[in-house]
Image (spheres, rainbow, N blue to C red):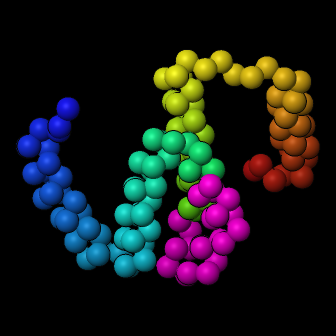
Amino acid sequence: MAPPLFLLVMLGVAVPLLITLGLAMASELQVMAVALGILALLAIFVNPFWGLVAFVGLLYTRPEEVLPALAGMRLTLMVSVITLVAFTFHSIIKRQSPVKTPINYLMAGFALIVMISAIPTGILS
């Protein structure tokens, strides 16, 4: 089923206007990062595996440290959260039950112990 013509016209007008507004108010690298991020978001929601690939790529390349204009954008954190949400939606839509293995309980226990051990040192505050 093809999208309505009105929607295509609005997207054809809205996307260039948003890019122009972004270029006027922010740096080119940030606008490019946001545009690529939106494309990646769509790809991740279609297939969450690509989110894992993007996360590993960002984890190794660390673009926030290489390009000062991207400092503070937390791209790796955003990709990981979006991948988690996309995977959850993907699993719910396909009605997949979670795999029940003992490692799941061990991972949850490890996360709980890490949070409890951080309380006395003040890392969480």
On the question of residue 77 being in view, the answer is: no
Write the residue at 8% across / 43% down. 5
Of residue 21 and residue 41, the one placed in the foreground of this image is: 41
Residue 109 included in the magenta stretch of the image: no
Q: In the picture shown, does residue 100 fall above or below 17? A: above
Q: Nearer the viewer, residue 11 or 20?
A: 11
Q: Quadrant of residue 12?
A: bottom left
Q: Residue 37: give x, y in percent of width and height.
A: 44, 59
Q: Main secondary structure of the magenta part?
A: helix
- Observer-nearest of 26 and 51: 51
Where residue 103 appears, x then y in whole percent? 87, 30
Question: In the picture shown, does residue 2 fall above or below 104?
Answer: below
Would you say 57 lies left or right of 103 here? left
Which residue is rendered at x = 55% and y = 42% of the image? Answer: 48
Say left or right for 110 vs 28. Answer: right
Is residue 79 in view from this perspective?
yes
Q: Is residue 17 left or right of residue 101?
A: left
Which sits in the foreground, 77 or 88?
A: 88
Residue 61, x across and y down, in percent: 66, 72
As drawn, 31 above or below 3: below
Q: Residue furthest front?
A: 1
Q: Residue at x 56, y 68 (%)?
A: 72
Q: Residue at x 87, y 47 (%)?
A: 118
Q: Quadrant of residue 4?
A: top left
Residue bounds of the magenta highlight: 53-73
Residue 71, located in which quarter of the rendered image? bottom right
| Residue 56 is one of the magenta-drawn residues | yes
Please state, as top left, top right, bottom left or bottom right, where the N terminus lies in the image.
top left
Q: Is 62 left, or right, of 111 in this rendering?
A: left
Q: Position of residue 79 (x, y in %)?
A: 56, 53
> Total marks drawn?
0
